[in-house]
Amino acid sequence: MDINTVNILITGGLGFIGRALAQHLLAEGGHRLTIVDKLSEQVHGPDPDYSDITTHPQVSFFRADICTPGVLCEALAGAEVVYHLAAETGTGQSMYEIQSYFQSNVMGTAALLEHIVRDPARRPRSVVLASSRSVYGEGAYVRETKAQDPGATRHFPRTRRVADMEAGRFDFQLDGTPLTPVPTRETDPTDPQSLYAASKLTQEQMCRIACASVGVNFTALRFQNVYGPGQSLRNPYTGILSIFTNILRQGGTIDIFEDGEESRDFVYVQDAVRALRVAPDRAPGTPEVINVGQGARISVARLVAMLERKIGVEGRSKVSGRFRPGDIRHNYADTTLMATVLGLSSLVDLETGLSATVDWALTQPAEDDRSEKANRELSAFLKTKTRGWT
């Protein structure tokens, strides 16, 4: 399918990734965009201004929740490609704002799919879902002694025991042998460890079933941790780089959980946009679920050190040993399908992307540090280290 000169619907089109996608498509030219976004104050602030997008002559904008009756009926009219990005994000907050997350993520997806299934006049040729690496839970592991063996048996441990974490034992073992992480494949088992993750996996399953029933091409992109300029600096529930940058620029101290060696895979927002841009062209018969990430992991402690160097501060972090039951230890993507199916390689490296992100953040108004407020809300899940952990 040629995506040029088509009508495109972006749900959540003024969120972090959606806005970057919209800007890219408008700069490219030849597209008619319809954007639906409720502009949540938690993410966008009390008086957001995206007039550079919303007043563009090639854009129709609906400030509304996608669950609002009638909105999607109008927004889907003529759409050939749908990018479904509208969602509540944040693993921790999802554990107690359960109805809100499932209303937006699951019922919002249901509303979209019901229109697509029921009305051929509102049926796009392609639906692309922004999914999440969180659906895997913990990633894939092998025995440390087999780390260099490509044929080593892969293990998929479940959530760690609270008793182990209270004692400072954060890594996995199998029969007394340490396990080491390896890249997680799309064919590996899913095991959501948060209600956010459960809602994203549900979205995938709903889209796969509904789209297949009416012959609509469907692709799910499982994004690793997306970061970059434009990410909300006021939302304390998601976006580790933006949260940490906001803390450091205001003279605060970063509380590094566990032992600081927990690791993540980060992908620059423009690379996420590249993946979204080509996903509707996915060749028939190729896998519909695709990881999007660097395919490399970095520890939280090392990430914070990079931030401190970039901002020009030192000693503004501490490893506290605190932890949240259900948090994953490691997860990074196998990017083979991203390269072979989507044709994406040579992604922006973390140092370059981090530098651009901080440079942008320092031009923005300072936001109150809401991270401790978020931690207090999570107090039912947040544990402190015991004297047995040093």
Image (tube, helix red, strand yellow):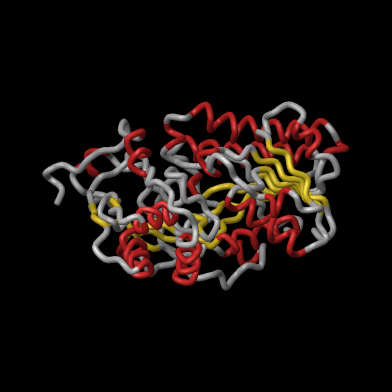
Q: Is residue 43 left or right of residue 22?
A: left
Q: Tell me which corner region of the image, top left, top right, bottom left or bottom right, holds residue 259.
A: bottom left
Q: Is residue 295 left or right of residue 9?
A: left
Using the image, determine if residue 213 lies above or below residue 365. above
Q: Residue 252, percent across and down?
A: 30, 53
Q: Is residue 323 visible?
A: yes
Q: Tell me which corner region of the image, top left, top right, bottom left or bottom right, holds residue 165.
A: top left
Q: Is residue 133 left or right of residue 390?
A: right
Q: Is residue 217 visible?
A: no
Foreground of the two, 365 or 276 = 365
Figure quadrant of the N terminus: bottom right
Q: Is residue 198 left or right of residue 169?
A: right
Q: Residue 77, percent across and down?
A: 84, 40
Using the image, determine if residue 99 lies above or below residue 2. above
- Residue at horizontal 66%, vertical 55%? 287
Q: Residue 191, percent across and down?
A: 46, 42
Q: Tell me which corner region of the image, top left, top right, bottom left or bottom right, holds residue 39.
A: top right
- Residue at horizontal 73%, vertical 63%? 27
Q: Residue 161, percent across and down?
A: 28, 40
